[in-house]
Amino acid sequence: MKKKSFLFSIKLAILFSTLLLLINCNSNNNETGTTNVSNPQDSIKKMLARGDYLVNHVSRCLTCHSQRNFNQFSGPVVPGTEGMGGEEFGKNYHVQGIVYARNITPDTVNGIGSWTDEEIARAITRGISKNGDTIYRMMPFAHFNQMSKEDVYSIIAYLRTLKPNNNKVPARKLDVNAAAVYPVLKSSSLEANVKPDVMEMAKYGGYLVASAACMDCHTPIKNGEYEQDKLFSGGLQFNMGSFVANSANLTPDSATGIGSWSEQMFLDKFKLYRDPAVYSANPGRNNSVMPWTAFTNMDDFDIKAIYKYLRTLPPVKNLVVKYPQ
């Protein structure tokens, strides 16, 4: 019991220090030179709630860094495996070789328990690990690179609350040098990143789309690179052995994309999977890699904002056959 209490105290101290860092970075002094700071405990709760939301429903860290059960529709996370890593990604995910999702639990030996907040933030937003290795670009750090500092550190705070797991993940086996395929980063510093005001709905939706890395699965790849003139037009194939599926065209093309979809139709597509009964059965070859069970509990407003943003994209005519086999 003493050990558990000690570990809880350590976690609380880390969260509190992270919170103070964010307050110092983001506080604005008024004319009298005073700063309005809410109750630290309330701020920690809000920070953890935001981290929970991002980790589980937007950026979906646990979708890749846990085990998924593809005997159910869209492969929901297997309870008890959250953050343990070990999932293998190869040619079925268009990886140039094989990579394994890392253990992101607070285990101090095989996880990220010994990493500082800054080291974790660098891995998330710049693709550089604690020991200086370049992370392979399947980890969408090029998109997370655009997230606000507050959101990134909320993710870190939440990850530190996961149950430590000592799962040792195998080393990757790449056919290329990860540094040689390092993507272009749009932001040079987290300090400069700003989360758009929710009232700028389309712009805010674009922020969420980047935070969810939608582009990576919904853009065709040619010669190992995303086709820049076909962004979000779908057709990227995922061969999972028991099923083969192509990603959907998300551009506003009226014939082959979502141009004919209303906002309500788009929202209802996500809301459908809020009932576990909808995805608990084995769909066989009609399965999906798309993590609907993670995205389904996004806030309705956020889903609508994503729709607004997608409607601003250039329409691309690309007819996608969802299940080619």
Image: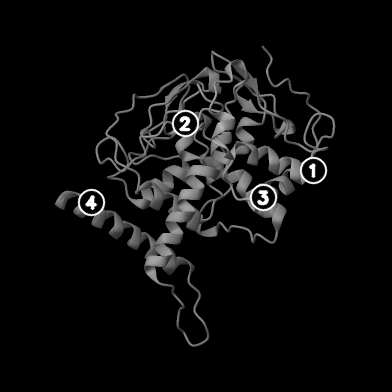
Left or right? Give the position of 3 relative to 213. Answer: left
**Circle 3: element type:** helix
- Mark 4 highlights which residue? 7
Nearest-to-viewer mark from 3 and 1: 1
Residue kind at label 2, given as amino acid type: Tyr
In whole angstroms, how far apart are the C-alphas of marks 3 and 1? 16 Å
**Sequence-first tag of 4 and 1:** 4
Relative to 78, say whether 262 is above or below. below
| Labelled pair 2, 1 in contact (Cβ < 8 Å) | no
Q: Which residue is drawn at the image coordinates 25% and 54% (left, top)?
A: 8
Q: Residue 58 falls in which quadrant of the image? A: top right
Q: Which residue is drawn at the image coordinates 31% and 43% (left, top)?
A: 106
Few, some or many residues within 10 Å of mark 1 (<14, 14–19, 20+): few
| Labelled pair 3, 1 in contact (Cβ < 8 Å) | no
Badge number at residue 136: 2
**Sequence-first tag of 2 and 4:** 4
Residue furthest bottom in the image:
32
Relative to 24, say whether 89 is above or below. above
Left or right? Give the position of 170 relative to 203. Answer: left
Q: Position of residue 237 (x, y in %)?
A: 63, 20
- Mark 1 highlights which residue? 262
Q: Nearer the viewer, residue 322 or 108?
A: 322
- Mark 3 highlights which residue? 205
Q: Residue 123 falls in which quadrant of the image? A: top left
Relative to 237, say whether 254 is above or below. below
Nearest-to-viewer mark from 2 and 1: 1
**Sequence-first tag of 3 and 1:** 3
In whole angstroms, how far apart are the C-alphas of marks 4 and 1? 49 Å
Identify the image quadrant of the C terminus. top right
Q: Which residue is drawn at the image coordinates 73% and 43% (left, top)?
A: 310
| Labelled pair 2, 3 in contact (Cβ < 8 Å) | no
Q: Position of residue 41 (x, y in %)?
A: 37, 66
